[in-house]
Amino acid sequence: MTRAHDVTQIPLARPQLGEEEIAAVAEVIRSHWVSQGQKVAELEERFADYVGARHAVALTSATTALHLALLVSGISSKDDVICPSFSFVATANSIRYVGARPVFVDIDPHTYNLDPSLVEQAITRATKAILVVHQIGLAADLDALNQIAQSHGLVVIEDAACAIGARYRGKLIGAAQNLACFSFHPRKLITTGEGGMVTSHDGQVAAKLRQLRSHGASVSDVARHQAGGILTEVYDVLGYNYRMTDLQAALGLVQIRRLPGILARYAAIANQYTRALGDMQEVEVPYVPEYATHSYQSYLVRFTTRCRTPRDEVLRRMVARGISSRRGISPIHLEPLYASSSVRLPATEEAARATMFLPIFADMTDEQITFVVDSLKASIAQS
Ligand SMILES: *Cc1c(COP(=O)(O)O)cnc(C)c1O
């Protein structure tokens, strides 16, 4: 691999994978137990220990994690669930899976997360839950949101798809009492190819999640195997097949060992960007409130009114230089699927117009960071 290639073809994100992952997956293949088993149980234990939750239940994605989290929380048709629109479409889709209605509430323009005061105003008799997103790895204001939920008798579920390793008031996301749903998609900090996790402090809820992910069976595959085929499962609820495999979990076990190093590298890259761009009048760097430790799953810059070059033109120029930048998040309420909700969300719409992702991934070199910074400055300045 030449250096020129290295510097001028920069992806937006790239998982850190190596020989250890290959060996771990190979070991599972050699064992012949390739579906859900001991490796999944081990990953669940590691994950729960890491975030500081009593239980963790592995699923096939954050999307299926959100689906089951809403289901075990008793959310169903006739219920409204408050969520942000400045998120990935899966946030709102999961609410639809249980027959409930997503009610989009605007974000704080600085944090890109739900604005607690607007959440409070949006609560009606039909509101049953708040689906809080910790967008791009920055914790939402959990104390404020939990307090609002408590005073109105609402459930809080956390969409922590981007928030592995992110902290709220020093505690890792997942340590709070709410169900929190994580993603192991390659676009996030650590990956299992596809995969997700729900954390909970409640053993009964965890057991229910395990039953629902496995067709509703009252006995797990491992328990049945260990009983030598004597145990038979009973089906008394409508379940799903949302089982992570041991192949994925073996990958995840290596990835979770890498996590501290990955988080440190993301923070270092983000700091380098912020130092290099912080003085520019044309862009605003990410805002981090005192309560949060950003995981920088993504690094989002916002163009100010001082920037004369339109955002999409800056994007085109960056792409022409071999840097795969992306515009910010597309608001869900503007997608055709959700167009019937005629809600206006000024902060969300403005953030979508004025923001852009810069590349960030663990193996990014200092030269690549410098090249991105120089290219951004040149793309803005060029007339
Ligand atoms: C990525 C993402 C999801 C979906 O995660 P999957 O594991 O791909 O299902 C949900 N919500 C948010 C905020 C995300 O960023």
Image: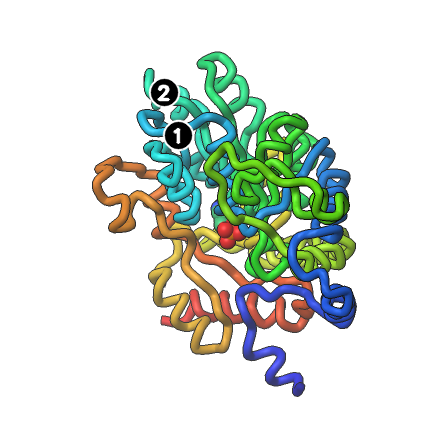
Instruction: Report if the beta carbon of the residue with label 2 is closer than 8 angstroms to ligand 1.
Output: no
Q: Position of residue 299 (x, y in %)?
A: 55, 54
- Which of the pair 279/367 is nearer the observer? 367
Q: Is residue 52 placed above or below 43 in the rendered structure? A: above
Q: Quadrant of residue 177?
A: top right
Assess disc 2: are there few (<14), some (14-19) or many (≥20) residues with their C-alpha within 10 Å of its C-alpha. Answer: many
Q: Is residue 271 placed above or below 118 in the rendered structure? A: below
Residue 111: tell me if it is visible: no
Taking the spot 57% from the left edge, 36% from the top edge, the residue there is 234
Tell me the colour scheme of the image: rainbow
Please state which amino acid type lies under the numbered disc 1: Ile
Q: Upstream in the sequence, badge 2 or badge 1?
A: 1
Taking the spot 43% from the left edge, 65% from the top edge, the residue there is 380
Taking the spot 63% from the left edge, 33% from the top edge, the residue there is 206
C-alpha span from label 2 to label 1: 8 Å
Q: Residue furthest front?
A: 230
Classify mark 2: helix, strand or loop: loop
Which part of the image, by quadrant, shows the N terminus? Answer: bottom right
Assess disc 1: are there few (<14), some (14-19) or many (≥20) residues with their C-alpha within 10 Å of its C-alpha. Answer: many
Residue position for label 1: 82
Q: Is residue 312 left or right of residue 213?
A: left
- Which of the pair 255/292 is nearer the observer? 255
Residue 123: assigned label: 2
Q: Where is residue 219 in the image (x, y as percent from the top left)?
A: 64, 39
Classify mark 1: helix, strand or loop: strand
Q: In which quarter of the image is residue 319?
A: bottom left
Please state which amino acid type lies under the numbered disc 2: Ile
Q: Where is residue 259 in the image (x, y as percent from the top left)?
A: 73, 53
Q: Position of residue 330 (x, y in %)?
A: 37, 52
Taking the spot 51% from the left edge, 15% from the top edge, the residue there is 150
Is label 2 in contact with label 1 (beta carbons under 8 Å)?
yes
